[in-house]
Amino acid sequence: MDDSQQLIAALPVPVVLIGRDERVAAANAPAVALLGADPTGRHHGLTLRQPALLEAIGRAMQPGAPTVEVRHVIPGPSSEVVHRVTVTPVPQGVVCTFLDLSEQEQIGQMRRDFVANVSHELRTPLTALLGFIETLRGPAREDAAARDRFLGIMAREAERMNRLVRDLLQLSRVEAQERVRPTEPIDLAAALRASVLALRPMAEEQGVSIEVAGADHPLEVPADPDQITQVLNNLIENAVKYGGAGGRVLATLGRGQGPRGSMAKIEVRDFGEGIDQIHLGRLTERFYRVDGHRSREKGGTGLGLAIVKHIVNRHRGRLTIESRPGQGSTFTILLPES
Ligand code: ADP
């Protein structure tokens, strides 16, 4: 290896040096991985095929040429890989440095999707509210019965917006704290018993019984008590809401094997209709619902499981979802005990 090859080999991003003879003089390991084969010794046009990049290299070979940047896109099976290539003239020829923009572009896309989703979720109840206000001011002005009915619907829609804003704030708070792992020990058994006690009336109203197992003895883990309560409430509420057809929900506390040896395990199981396999991987995405209409009807925001996932991440735990259509679903959480 000559000096420039050694220098390029030490750089952590893909770098290709093209000599004055237009052949690749050096390419480091990240560049070989990106281009699929080692281009060293070959004409650069055989591997760097994109016209904008070839043109920039051609210009950079001219005396006194400035450094330029071009976009380089490699189509992939699921998404494209986008790089910003800096083309710099050097005495030996031209250096091309690739900076991966895929993640940045993906984050940008996610942010745009998120804003679009939030706007859509808020607009639906807002449109309903505006419509009823119009009606109450006009045609239903003197109609006491209609007024009562409309006010009931308006209150429901306003509550929906309230829940959405509450969940959005909660989500952003948990995300902001995600790097800071809680350290205070709390008793999961007590937390589980308290959650079940609070949710039982709601469940019984819908003909669902909640059974608890393994919560007689304390089981301490370092955790944020409010967030653990939120996780338990979300999972048990979902089990009642979506799996209630089975008539019962089973919440079990115990220990299980995880990536960090023995971990505390909370299982929330329902015996309802279950979830089709194709949805399982996406349930924790924001606003992902198996049946949007049904979720909204039950007052869901589509954010519950996203919040659960972030809280579990913050605790360095694991969330797994298993389900068989027709047999119900099991949501399992593993939390490190120390
Ligand atoms: P929400 O309940 O507000 O819609 P979640 O994030 O809590 O949002 O859940 C996302 C989706 O996952 C729900 O809309 C529902 O389709 C599905 N789901 C969650 N829990 C269960 C369950 N126990 N059984 C069947 N489907 C479920």
Image (tube, grey):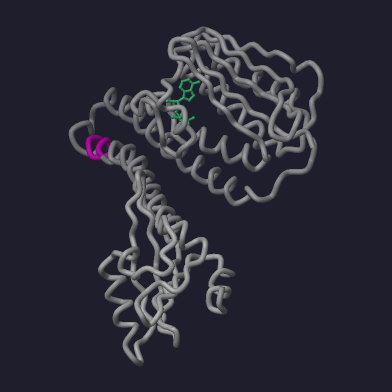
What secondary structure prevails in the magenta region? helix
* On screen, residue 189 above or below 287: above
Residue 145 versus residue 324: which sits nearer the camera? 324
Residue 336 versus residue 48: which sits nearer the camera? 48
Residue 95 x/y as whole percent: 43, 77
User: Residue 55 vs residue 27: left or right?
Assistant: left
* On screen, residue 86 above or below 219: below
For the C terminus, which image quadrant?
A: top right
* On screen, residue 288 above or below 243: below
Residue 271 versus residue 293: which sits nearer the camera? 271
**Residue at 36%, 79% in the rendered image:** 68
Residue 23: name its quadrant.
Answer: bottom left
User: Residue 290 vs residue 335: left or right?
Assistant: left
Residue 239 x/y as whole percent: 52, 19
For the N terminus, which image quadrant?
A: bottom right
Q: Residue furthest bottom?
A: 64
Residue 120: name its quadrant.
Answer: top left
Residue 215: name its quadrant.
Answer: top right
**Residue at 50%, 13% in the rendered image:** 328
User: Residue 209 vs residue 290: left or right?
Assistant: right
Residue 135 falls inside the magenta stretch: yes
Figure disc tally:
0
**Residue at 41%, 64% in the rendered image:** 39
Q: Which residues make up the magenta segment? A: 131-136
Residue 178 x/y as whole percent: 63, 48
Residue 122 x/y as whole percent: 36, 42
Residue 84 versus residue 130: which sits nearer the camera? 84
